[in-house]
Amino acid sequence: CTELTVENLNEPDLSKVFANTNEMKSYAGSAFRVLHNSMQDYDSPASAMGVGADQFTCPWGYAYVYQFSSEPRNPFVNSTTYSYIYAIQGFWEECYAAISIANDILRLIQFNGAEFVEDESDIKILQAWSYFVSGVAHGYLGLTFDQADIVLNDTDLDTLNLVPWQNMIDVSLDLLDKAISIANENTFLLPAEWMGGGLYSNIELSALANSYAARILAYSSRNKTHNESIDWNRVLNYTNNGIQKNLQPEMGDKYDFYDYYTVYQIYIGWSRIDHRIINLMDPDYPSRWPNNGVS
């Protein structure tokens, strides 16, 4: 060996991985599935947030659920050595996995698109889809964490810096707006497997992106002051242009969409609706569990 710098032929770039448009589409289509399954996993932040929000109650010691059900709320121990760190770590990693897929597709289109995508409509599908997935993922990171990394298709990964959650929300809406714009200006139909068997036209993808944007912007409020400063007309505009059908991917092995969060919540002896919710429907029912165990 006469040189210290040797090309690693066992580390192919994306242009060597994909042989055709269908392979690109298959890879791109996995992005939302990765994101959905992480949101709906049994050990995602949703379980702890559910008891923290008094939506349901659960005595089991998994995913920080038992600890976060106590009042006053126990602060989360944000340490990689904490036994329940998996309750946030997996979700964080899978959000960025979905973002990575979206960015791979956008970069490949930008630099090598003509080599793999002959049909201009396929380019528009892939772009709208990638911006949509990245927008939702950045938004949910902003909703869940105090700070996170903005990772766009042109981001230098060596210069990443954590930014406040509000920055994540802003970038999320920018990305979703791009998805909405592309979807509104082009005609296409998403492959059914991308949405768990659901057929989505360009108009319906635009509507879905609008609904996610409305949700992310409305849910981003963390206190009264911020709630009053939100552009609620923007929320209304997103909502008015939102979905007209349920987001309802088929669960199971056919499309590899899963909802273990719901599986656990309805599992016999696992969880039940919180007393405060029951009290809203039946005022005679105690809104809190009596200290003496007798209503």
Image (cartoon, grey):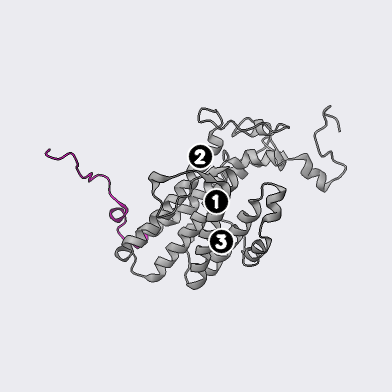
Whichever of callouts 3 and 2 sits on the residue coming sooner in the sequence is 2
Whichever of callouts 1 and 2 sits on the residue coming sooner in the sequence is 2
Q: Which mark is residue 155?
A: none
- Residue 283 in sight here: yes
Dot 3 surroundings within 10 Å: few (below 14), some, or many (20 or more)?
many
The x, y position of residue 59, in whole percent, is: 68, 31
The x, y position of residue 210, in whole percent, is: 59, 62
Badge 1 marks a residue whose secondary structure is helix
Q: 198 or 84, which lies in front?
A: 84
> Which residue is labeled 1 in the image?
167
Q: Are marks 1 and 2 in contact (CB under 8 Å)?
A: no
User: In the drawing, does residue 142 fall left or right of residue 119?
Assistant: right
User: In the drawing, does residue 288 fall left or right of residue 45?
Assistant: right
CA gap, disc 1 and disc 3: 19 Å
Q: Which mark is residue 90?
A: 2
Q: 188 or 100, which lies in front?
A: 100
> Which residue is labeled 3 in the image?
209
- Residue 253 in sight here: no
Magenta span? 1-23
| Count of number-bearing discs | 3
Badge 2 marks a residue whose secondary structure is helix
Which residue sits at x=32%, y=53%? 14
Dot 1 surroundings within 10 Å: few (below 14), some, or many (20 or more)?
some
CA gap, disc 3 and disc 2: 24 Å
User: In the drawing, does residue 183 fall left or right of residue 21?
Assistant: right
Amino acid type shown at disc 2: Gly
219 in relation to 189, above or below: above
Q: Give the mark toward the camera: 1 or 3.
A: 1
Amino acid type shown at disc 1: Asn
Badge 3 marks a residue whose secondary structure is helix
Quarter of the figure with the N terminus: top left
Amino acid type shown at disc 3: Ala
